[in-house]
Image (spheres, rainbow, N blue to C red):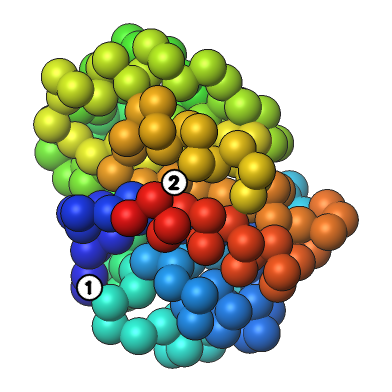
Amino acid sequence: MSINFLHSDTTGIKICGLNEEEMVDVAVGSGAGAIGFVFVEESPRYIERHEADALMLQLPDDVTGVAVLQNSPSLDSFSSWNGLLQLCGDENEEVVATAPRPVIKAVQWDPVEVLRWDGFENVKAILVDGSSGGLGVSFDVTELAELIKSIKTPIIIAGGLTPENVQEVIRIANPAAVDVSSGIESSLGVKDPELICEFIKNVTELG
């Protein structure tokens, strides 16, 4: 399993909420380093496990598959998942430390929460969002930009990112990676291939 998108000289790109073969091809072909599959049933981007497993087979070795979960009663069924687990709920330290796969811990922006998970066992990155996730809510990244300079765990910025604003967010905060879902949709839960390509192009243009 590769997590190169978190440790590159350039900003990593995670495209989240994909559930169609065509959109996975577009994202990977355009340069995404990670693809997120949402296993939260309430989400308009929900995907069944067998469908995600089939799409995972499309991913080249250098692209990471991310299982997006929220307060799951058990993570045991993901011991066979060949990628990262993104935990977006109120999962505590025990759940995160004992997760069967390495974790991206997602938090709503709060410096206390970021510091809580910095350097924590089994956490490969902290995803900082403007909401509880998937709602397209942005936040002022200025304070986070200062925090990033002093912590060791890679930071992924999410929430309200679009092709239009992602370059400014990267210039201010210089995160390890950016994550987008609603900002590349033509309607709720429906990805737009042109927006995917535009988003990735605007990130990679920064070098």
Which quarter of the figure is the N terminus placed in? bottom left
Q: Position of residue 51 (x, y in %)?
A: 60, 81
Which quarter of the figure is the C terminus placed in? bottom left
* 46 vs 148, nearest the viewer: 148
Q: Position of residue 33 (x, y in %)?
A: 37, 66
Residue 86 in sight: no
Q: Residue at x 28, y 83 (%)?
A: 61
Asked whether the beta carbons under mark 1 and mark 2 sit within 8 Å of each other, the answer is no
Q: Position of residue 130 (x, y in %)?
A: 57, 25
Q: Residue at x 57, y 50 (%)?
A: 180
> Residue 178, labelled with which disc?
2
Q: CA distance from mark 1 to mark 2?
A: 19 Å
> Residue 1, labelled with which disc?
1
Q: Left or right? Give the position of 20 relative to 117.
A: right
Residue 77 placement: quadrant: bottom left
> Residue 148, labelled with which disc?
none
Q: Residue at x 42, y 59 (%)?
A: 204
